[in-house]
Image: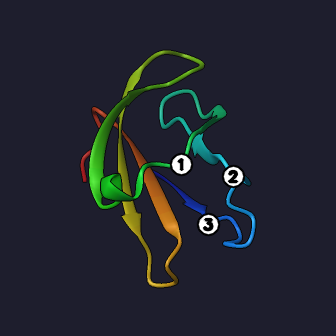
Amino acid sequence: WILCVWHRAEEDDPDSVEWIPVTCPSCFETFEIPPPDPSEVSSQLDYDCEVCCRPMVLLVYEDELGDVAVEAFGLDDSG
C-alpha cells in the first residue's frame, strides 16, 4: 500500500485547490487526483491508475492533524 497526505488549502484562499498525489501500487507511477468532497472523507473509493489503468482502492480519511490522507491498495494487496 502507498500513503499520501494532502494538506488543506489555506482558508483565506478558497480558490486555491491542491490536488492529491497518488502513487499506484502496481506501476509505482505518481499522478494527482482532485481533493474529495468533505462528505467523501473517511471512505473507500474504487479508482483506476491514470498511467497503467490497473484498478486500486483508495482509502480516504482525516488524520490526527486534520489533513486528508489517502492510502492506495492494489486489489491483490492484503490489508
Q: Quadrant of residue 48?
A: top left
Q: Is residue 21 above or below residue 49?
A: below
Residue contact at pointers 3 and 2, CB within 8 angstroms = yes
Label 2 CA crowd tier, 10 Å (few <14, some 14–19, many 20+): some
Measured from the top left, where is residue 61 in percent x and y? 37, 64
| Residue holding disc 3 | 8
Give me the residue at 64% from left, 33% from top.
31
Q: Quadrant of the C terminus?
A: bottom left
For this rendering, which residue is in front, 66 or 10?
A: 10
Q: Earlier in the sequence, mark 1 or mark 3?
A: 3
Residue at image mark 2: 18
User: In the image, is residue 38 above or below residue 34?
Assistant: below
Q: Amino acid at mark 2?
A: Glu
Q: Amino acid at mark 1?
A: Pro
Amino acid marked by disc 3 = Arg
Residue 26 at x, y percent in the picture: 48, 29
Tag 1 residue: 35
The location of residue 37, given as percent across then percent down, is 42, 50
Q: Residues within 10 Å of mark 1 (few under 14, many from 20)?
A: some
Q: Is residue 58 left or right of residue 26?
A: left
**Circle 3: is it few (<14), some (14-19), or many (20+) Cα within 10 Å?**
some
Along the line of sight, the residue nearer the viewer: 7 or 72: 7
Q: CA distance from mark 3 to mark 2?
A: 7 Å
Tell me which residue sits at (73%, 72%) in the image: 12
Label 1: which secondary element: loop
Q: Secondary structure at mark 3?
A: loop
On screen, residue 67 versus residue 11, left or right, reads: left
Q: How many marks?
A: 3
What residue is drawn where x is 28% and y is 33%? Answer: 76
Which residue: 48% across, 15% down?
53
Mark 2 secondary-structure assignment? loop
